Image (cartoon, helix red, strand yellow):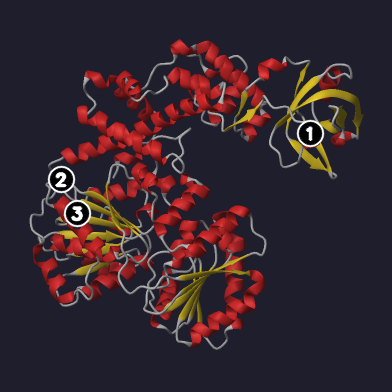
Amino acid sequence: MAKELQYVKGIGPKRAEVLNRDGIMTEADVLEYYPYRYVDRSKIYAITELRADMSYVQIYGRFMSKQVVGEGSRKRLTAQFADGTGAIEIVWFKGMNYVADQINTTDHFLLFGKPTSFGGRINMAHPEMEREPDRAKFEGKLMPIYSSTDGMRRAGISNKVMQSIVANVFADITLGGIAETLPTELTRRHNLMGRAQALWTIHNPSDLQTLEVARFRMKFEELFYVQLALLRNRNVNLRKSDGISLDKPGAHLSEFYAKHLKFEPTGAQKRVVHEVWADMKSGRQMNRLVQGDVGSGKTLVALMCMLIVTGNGKQACLMAPTEILANQHFESLTGELSGMGIKVAMLTGSVKSKARKEVLAGLANGGIDIVVGTHALIEPTVTFKDLALCVIDEQHRFGVEQRAKLWAKNTRPPHVLVMTATPIPRTLAMTIYGDLDVSVIDEMPPGRKPVATEHYYNSTRNRLNAFIRSELKKGRQAYIVYPLIKESERMDYKNLEEGYEFTRQCFPEYRVCMVHGKLKAEEKDEAMRQFSSGEAQIMVATTVIEVGVNVPNASVMVIESAERFGLSQLHQLRGRVGRGAEQSYCILMTANELARDTRRRIEIMCSSTDGFEIAEADMRLRGPGDIDGTQQSGVPFQLKVADLARDGQILSFARDCALETLKDDPTLSGPQSAVVRNRLMELQSTSVNWSMIS
């Protein structure tokens, strides 16, 4: 039986408390606290080779001298260390008496540490140190480096201590005590390393090749169980027979298509509508994600799907994350459906008293066919006569519990259509939305010109203003967007307000309006009305206009401090222009000096308008957890070694194996599934499985 963490040699109660706070609760958690990189301990560097930008290195030689210098908080032990090629200063700020007793000028020492530069000279602080080392024991040795937190460092849990703790846990448990978590047939068929050996190798690698075999095994295991959880849940949904069956597309869709549709839908739009209808007539509840780049026509797809529902005498709702977007959807739907006799209503926090009562009554008695709203739709007072379809726009803006409240608005669960204009990399979609059917609108409506994207520096502000003025003279309009980051919200609003005043001064002959999240709803709506109607030619805003704002006459999008945005958000903002027939432009304004990764992001934006390509690049640069919505939507279990940005091939392989496993035993209830069933239960007991709400 595994020990409590505090009783493991080298830990104790205080360190156990620190480790617990960092999510390391058991001995098993220690073994799954994987090194994030390794250092080749077989290489000995000459002191003359050292540079300040190097990672950890080893040097071998003798101490030439030592002395304590400075007073008080500046007191330190310094020593000169030489290896025949040169000399370097070694510094200690703590444990000086102990270190001074250990070093002498007669023995050889092996030092391991990080070269740094101080006063133009290379030095090394607090290196690991070994007197007269056995050089052979480092031959080919890869030393694990573990990530550390402030709490761990304060508790004295250095990298060396962590190595010792891991070794002590292995000594307690022994390899024979580490249970296998994959079926024998699966590991045998695919020649996977055993779990115990893989864990041991990751912490004690003998060479890079064996390490990669071990890491592959543990990455596969993580991704296999993520996919197994999602796919099993999907199987449960597919076996349900209590979905609302809609056997015919209905008269509403036929009439709309024949008499009201202004443009022929793209092939991709038609394909997605057919996929949705196939779900609706299957007798099972639909759970489908529709992905489409900015401007690909998701709203038209949603409207046509809602018309299938209303044509069958049932109700549909469309939930949007903001009142601005809800208002826009409402105006769009009422315009598209004018003269068809379909009753469309809106329900947001701004709909009050008498109007609200009328909407609630219409939903309850069936007088309203389609309702567009915000979070107001999930309030307990909202009831439907026969809700058959819930469309959720920009789904990542809603918490899963909020979305789940919509499902309970009907005796039989309504069909669910989730839409996102944030292109999601395939590997991420397979994981976050693995339990949903996915449709992709991968074709843009004809006639749209790609938005030309250019990079301007702050030093070229005058050239930018001249360009904006040239577009305004043509009768166009412009957005100027400022970042709003929670950690520096006060400063951001100050920059926004200063930017608003600066813009008014630069363009006195034009009307400038401002929109941000702190405005009252009526003030925000009035500013939006001014810009939409053309009364205002320039809108200064925060990212509140990131989704949903549709002003075809706007041809310029200026993004201030573009270096503070991720690629996906830059692409979303760019999508606010290019909605008319004229050429549109996105200007990325940055500081003159940029970090390498930031410069790469800007280059990608200027060279590509493909949202899916940009999303893939964004995930590679920033990691999957930083992409909009992925933290909230959640992967079923925490990934400790697998990386969705880099392990796409392993993910696909793991998904195939999970499908194979479920093909033989869809519910995992048979005796042959005992190993995976038990492991899945163990993982689910320690995780909030958001995937179960879809």
User: The residue under label 2 is which amino acid type?
Assistant: Arg
* Quadrant position of the C terminus in the picture: top left
Who is closer to the viewer here, 612 or 682?
Answer: 612
Residue 237 percent coordinates (x, y):
21, 40
Callout 3: SS:
helix
Cα distance in 3D space between marks 1 and 2: 66 Å
Sequence order check: which comes first, mark 1 or mark 2?
A: 1
Question: What residue is pinned by disc 2?
Answer: 284
- In the rendered image, residue 691, in percent from the top left (x then y), is placed at 32, 40
Report helix, strand or loop for mark 2: loop
Q: Nearer the viewer, mark 3 or mark 2?
A: 3
Numbered circle sitting on residue 275: 3
Q: Which residue is mark 1?
A: 124
The answer to whether 346 is drawn above or below residue 244 in the figure is below
CB atoms of marks 1 and 3 within 8 Å: no
Vertically, is 264 above or below 691?
below
Q: Which residue shows up at 50% across the image and 62% down it?
A: 605
Amino acid of disc 3: Glu
**First along the sequence among labels 1 and 3:** 1
Residue drawn at point x = 64 percent, y = 29 percent: 39
**Is 131 rendered above or below residue 479?**
above
Task: Report the number of discs.
Answer: 3
Pick the residue in front: 336 or 198: 198
Q: Report, in whole angstroms, how far the alpha carbon at label 3 lies from the one at label 2.
A: 13 Å
Q: Residues within 10 Å of mark 1 (few under 14, many from 20)?
A: many
